[in-house]
Image (cartoon, helix red, strand yellow):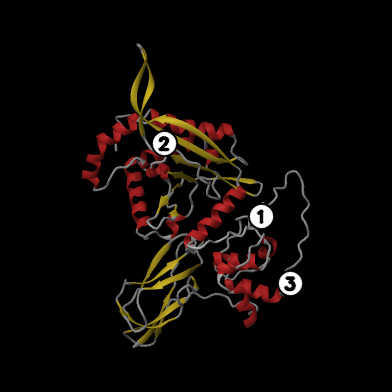
Amino acid sequence: MAEYKLLLPSMGEGVMEATIITWLFNEGDNVKEDDSVVEIATDKVDSDVPTPVSGKIVKILKQKDEVAKVGEAIAILEIEGEGAASEEVKTETPAATPDAETLKTIEEPLQTVAASNVEFSGDLYLSPLVKSIAQQENISETELKSIKGSGLEGRITKEDILAYVANRGSKPAQQAAPVQTASTPQPAVSAPAATIPVSAGDEIIPMDRMRKIIAENMVKAKQIAPHVTSFIETDVTNVVKWRNKNKAVFEKREGEKLTFMPIFVKAVVKAIQDFPMINVSVNGENIIKKKNINIGMATALPDGNLIVPVIKNADQLSLSGLAKAINDLAYRARNKKLRPEDTQGATYTISNVGSFGNLMGTPIIPQPQVAILAIGAIVKKPAVLETADGDVIAIRNLMFMSHSYDHRVVDGSLGGMMLKHVHDYLENWDLNTEI
C-alpha cells in the first residue's frame, strides 16, 4: 500500500487559500476516484474538492474552519501501490517563524478581530486571512508592499505576514500623517458601533461566513464610491411579445427556458459599446478602461445570501449563447456548483429586482466596478401612445430601470445617457430578432 497526499487544488486566478467547511467522509472511510470528499469556501464561492484517486482516508490534516493554502495537503489517503504519492506545490520557507505566543494571538477566530481603520486600495492582492491579520496588526499598505511574498507571483502568504509581525515587534509602527491636498482622497472615518440592547425573547443569529463577507464588501463599496442614481421607465411591450413568440420554440430546440435576462444583457452590452467609459475601474488617480465586457448577474441564493456570477465576454455571445450562459450560471449558483473563476472579473453588473416583484431599486455598486443597473418588475399599465391619428391610451408592459454609478468618474450626463440607450434598445426591440 502507498500513501497519497490529497492537496487543495488551484481554484482560479487570485485564489490562494480556502476554508474547510465540512468533510463529507471520515477517517477510515473508503472513497472512489472523483468522489467529492470535502466542502471548501473561498471569499467568492463554496465548492467541493474531489479526490483524483481511490483509496481510504487514513488522516485528515485540515479540520473544519481551518484555512489551507493552494497546494497544501489536506488529507492522506492509503492507495494501492508502493511508496508515497502527491502533487505538492513547493513554496519558499519564510525568513522567520513567529513564536507560539505570537501565532496564538494572531490566529484567534476571525470574528473576534477588533475593528481596524486600515484600508487597502485593491491594487495589492490579499487573501481574506492575510487581510484580516494585516488589519488586526495595523499593518499599512505601504508596509505590506515591502514584504517579499513567497506565494504564487510573489503574493503574501499567511507565513509571510506572521514572520513579518514576529520581526516587527508587538507595537505597531507609527505612521506619519499624510500631507492633505485638495486632490488627495481621504479615507472614510467609521463611527464606533452602537451597543444594541437585547430584550427578553430576542433571538441572536450569528452571521454565516458568506453574510460576513457580503456585509464587509457592501460597507466598503459605499465608503469608496459616491453613489448617484438615475431612473427611467421603459415600454418593453415588444420585448414581452418577442419572448412569448419564441420561448416555446427555444425550449423545444435547446431544452432550456428563455428568460428576459438575455435580452436585458444584450441591451446593456450595446449601451456599454456606445459608452465604453462606463466599463472602467478606478485605481488611485488612474482610470482603467476595460477591454472585455464581463457582465455580473446578481443572483439570490436559497439561503438568502447573494452571489454575482459573471458572463465572460458577453459582447461576443449571441442571444442564444447568452441564454445558455445565464441559465448555466444561475443553476450552478443555486446548487453551489460555481467555480471561483465564475465570480471573478465582472466589469458591469445587472440586478433584477423585478424577480422579487419590486418596481425599482438602488443597488450598491460592486467594487471595483463603477456602475450597476437595477431592473424592476414588468407591469401592465395604461400608457399614452402617439399615433398618426393623435394620442391614444393603450395597455402596455412598462418597467422601471435605475442606474447607480460612481460619481468620482461617471457624471450625470454619462450615467444618464447610458441608461437612456439601454431604454431605447429595449423599447425599440425588433420583433423579428432571431434567437
Judging by the rendered image, the residue that carries numbered circle 1 is: 191
**44 lies above or below 431:** below
Q: Position of residue 308 (x, y in %)?
A: 44, 52
Q: Which quadrant, please, contains the N terminus?
A: bottom left
Of callouts 3 and 1, which one flags the residue occurring earlier in the amino acid sequence? 3
Of callouts 2 and 1, which one flags the residue occurring earlier in the amino acid sequence? 1
Given the current orientation, which residue lies at the most extreme front position? 200
Tell me which amino acid carries mark 3.
Answer: Lys
Q: CA gap, disc 2 to disc 3?
A: 55 Å
At 44% from the left edge and 44% from the top edge, which residue is drawn? 351
At 53% from the left edge and 56% from the top edge, which residue is drawn? 215
Q: Residues within 10 Å of mark 1 (few under 14, many from 20)?
A: few
Mark 3: secondary structure: loop
Judging by the rendered image, the residue that carries numbered circle 3 is: 171
Q: Position of residue 329 (x, y in %)?
A: 37, 52
Given the current orientation, which residue lies at the most extreme top position? 389
Badge 2 vs badge 1, beta-carbon distance below 8 Å:
no
Q: Position of residue 89 (x, y in %)?
A: 49, 74
Judging by the rendered image, the residue that carries numbered circle 2 is: 267
Tell me which amino acid carries mark 2.
Answer: Ala
Of callouts 2 and 3, which one flags the residue occurring earlier in the amino acid sequence? 3
